Amino acid sequence: MSFRSSRHSSRSESEQAESRFKHAKKGMASNSMKLRRANKKPKAALKTAERKVILFNKPFDTLSQFTDGDGRKTLADYIPIKEVYAAGRLDRDSEGLMVLTNDGILQAKLTQPQSKSPKTYWVQVEGAPTEEQLEPLRQGVELKDGMTLPAKVEIMQEPKLWERNPPVRFRASIPTTWLVITIIEGRNRQVRRMTAHIGFPTLRLIRYSIGEMTLGELQPGEWTELPKS
């Protein structure tokens, strides 16, 4: 028969008490942090004269950021204006409209899912999907990161566009189709994954609009600043 010594028991109780104290202290710190966050004043809106909104036509093979350690093309190769930030990204292999701004409120409105800001893309896919084959996109499809929200999808005539460099690789035996797709989400490579899910891989993707802002006549690498209003 063995007995636990009173010394061991005392030490164990002391360790337990210390553990409870640390846990309680951690909880108090967490609650204090939450309280500070709740009481934090929202960032004041910029004055009209200070607000900058840039529309940019991002070329193919350009990163949606201002710096890169590997020598790849970035926004800094085209936009000399400082202290503006991208309101939503475009993949390196995608083209079209980017909005850059120093207005944090506008940036959040354009990028946060709950704002439901529509984004419209012109999408060239491999193959010739029928309306029936496009219907799942309009209902929502199951991707690895969950169901997509319903998208607006229509077949469109081939738009008049600049030549892409390098050009899209076509297979002569397979036709291609242009779609106009509008979504209110912004998951990583979402449109490409959606078209691949229904069996029509994306060959070229161009973002035409974000909210009420459109690409207009901007050519690749060109940008314009919206009038202050």
Image (spheres, rainbow, N blue to C red):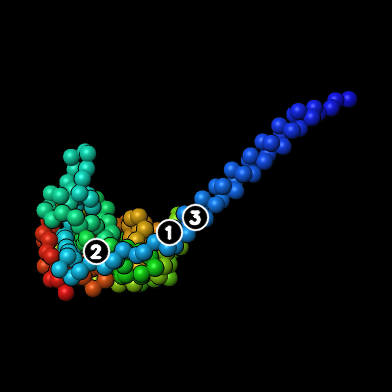
Q: Secondary structure at mark 2?
A: loop
Q: In the image, what residue type sits under mark 2?
A: Asp
Q: In the image, what residue type sits under mark 3?
A: Ser
User: Is the residue under label 1 in contact with that under label 3 (CB below 8 Å)?
Assistant: no
- Residue with the mark numbered 3: 32
The residue depicted at 56 percent of the width and 51 percent of the height is 27
Q: Secondary structure at mark 3?
A: helix
Q: Residue furthest top?
A: 1
Name the one closer to the observer, 209 or 121: 209
Residue 149 in view, yes or no: yes
Q: Position of residue 178 (x, y in %)?
A: 25, 65
- The numbered mark, 3 or 1, whose residue comes first in the sequence reads 3
Please tell me the numbered disc located at residue 37: 1
The residues bearing labels 1 and 2 have C-alpha atoms spaced at a distance of 21 Å
Residue 171 in view, yes or no: no
Q: Secondary structure at mark 1?
A: helix
User: Is the residue under label 3 in contact with that under label 2 (CB below 8 Å)?
Assistant: no
Nearer the observer: mark 2 or 3; the answer is 3
Q: In the image, what residue type sits under mark 1?
A: Arg
Label 2 packing within 10 angstroms: few (<14), some (14-19), many (20+): many
- Residue with the mark numbered 2: 103
